[in-house]
Amino acid sequence: MQEPLTTASGIPVPDDQNSISAGPRGPLLLQDFHLIEKLQHFNRERIPERVVHAKGSGAYGSFTVTHDITRLTKARLFDAVGKRTEVFVRFSTVGGERGSADTERDPRGFAVRFYTEDGNWDLVGNNTPMFFIKDPVKFPDFVHTQKRSPQSNLKSARMMFDFWSRAPESLHQVTMLFSDRGTPDGYRHMDGFGSHTFSLINARGERVWVKWHLKTQQGIRNLSAADAVRLAGEDPDYAQRDLFEAIARGDFPKWSVYLQVMTEEARQAWEQRTGWSAFDLTKVWPHADFPRLPVGVLVLDRNPDNYHAEVEQAAFSPANVVPGMGYSPDKMLQGRLFAYHDAQLYRVGTNHQQLAVNRPRCPVQHRQRDGAMALDNGGARANYATVEAAGTRPQGFGHGDPGWPLEGSAGRHDPRGSDDDHTQAGNLYRLMPAAEKKNLCENLARAMASVEGEIRHRMLGHLEKADPGYAAGVREALAALR
């Protein structure tokens, strides 16, 4: 029997699975000290390497607007077709250390910084449109299972599948991870996704919910499991080398940028019809219901001059949105709004925004002073803001963002038992051609080969609920390994 869980101060933790939120769908409340402490400690576990996304590659380029979306947003980077905005992009693997191989089976980070006239917009996503979990309180535990065993310092399939089999919400992403797309052929031949539900606000203060998609113009290309293993030994920096050398020879990679758009009325109707939440990070919005709308083109055309200064010290945060953009009640997004900036404060420093790669390209005016690496300490300017005696009369979230209504009582809300964690995973499996289904089942079987007993039984049970053919294919592949 496990010992009762407590905070680092010894206070009993009543629930380690569900954050405190305003209603079942959030947003989260800052009073949830266990969540805050857990994320803060997690961000400080490595010095100075990133805990996740440790190994990465980066490049500069531009984003050009190709289609008018001013009806949806007043964000100035979209205010004219043909408008160009400088960008910096960092690609990465997720679970491995800085010295790990680029071709490991792993999601890929796809973080884009737009240096706009209203400050930096950071679209911090992955090469998959979904994720493993839907509540940030589980994130440190999930990542620990993808890292190394505290006893052996080895990766452990048992840890991974123990977590996944107990968290059926992860099945959709696990299906993507063990498909052919789990080992992309470098960074140029994969798509990118903002993954979370964000929002756009137009000049009339009207909000729509959106998801961002970046489609590679180079075409999707993946490595077979055998080629990925071979390259891990022959050229562990394969993806980084491919990106750097392509840009150096003038073969500039490009992505088409799209939006899925959902009005509030459409959200309510869709959730009523499907039973899925538009703010659930483990789900996608079907293209048949919400088609992608073209927005622009992103191109990378300049390599950094110094890897450490410009790639290693790049500090992204999904909290960085500009006027005309907003967040959503997505619990994972709400957790990341805190956790990412906090990680950069620890990893790079309190003045990390003053470094060249992080510095906005627009004028900056704030009252922050001192601390490590204070490259611009404000000179003689005041270090405090004057208080408006008459008040500021705030409206909504500011910048014309009206905010959103909250519902339900504050507390911990456990969706298990009511959420559908299997249908979309099954839909993804059913979309695959026969050869890709076979690869998926064989990849999962090889990963599960050392996992026996209850964990394997639980995992196969989730596959069965997603699609009986999915479970049968993995069972057949497991039997072939004996």
Image (cartoon, rainbow, N blue to C red):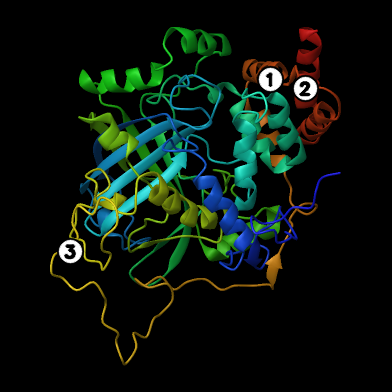
Q: CA distance from mark 3 to mark 2?
A: 58 Å
Q: Quadrant of the C terminus?
A: top right
Please give left or right for residue 280 compared with residue 372 in the image: right
Q: Is disc 2 placed on a helix, strand or loop?
A: loop
Residue placed most toward the observer, 194 or 43: 43
Identify the residue under disc 3.
378
Q: What residue sits 68% from the left and 63% below the top?
A: 24
Q: Is disc 1 placed on a helix, strand or loop?
A: helix
Sequence-wise, the earlier of marks 3 and 1 is 3
Q: Is residue 285 above or below residue 220?
A: below
Mark in front: 1 vs 2: 2
| Badge 1: residue crowd in 10 Å (few <14, some 14–19, many ≥20) | some
Quadrant of res 62: top left
Mark in front: 3 vs 1: 3
Please say if the residues under marks 1 and 2 sit with CB atoms less than 8 Å apart.
yes
Q: Is disc 3 placed on a helix, strand or loop?
A: loop
Q: Type of residue at label 2?
A: Val
Q: Type of residue at label 1?
A: Ala
Question: Residue reaching furthest front?
Answer: 9
Q: CA distance from mark 1 to mark 2?
A: 8 Å
Q: Is residue 360 visible?
A: yes
Q: Quadrant of the N terminus?
A: top right
Please give left or right for residue 454 compared with residue 210 in the image: right
Q: What residue sits 65% from the left and 47% below the top?
A: 138
Identify the residue under disc 1.
447
Q: Is residue 427 above or below residue 104?
A: below
Q: Find residue 335 and report its horizontal and vertical position in percent.
A: 54, 55
Please give left or right for residue 40 compared with residue 160 in the image: left
Q: Type of residue at label 3?
A: Gly
* Disc ID at residue 451: 2
Quadrant of res 442: top right
Residue placed most toward the observer, 428 or 144: 144
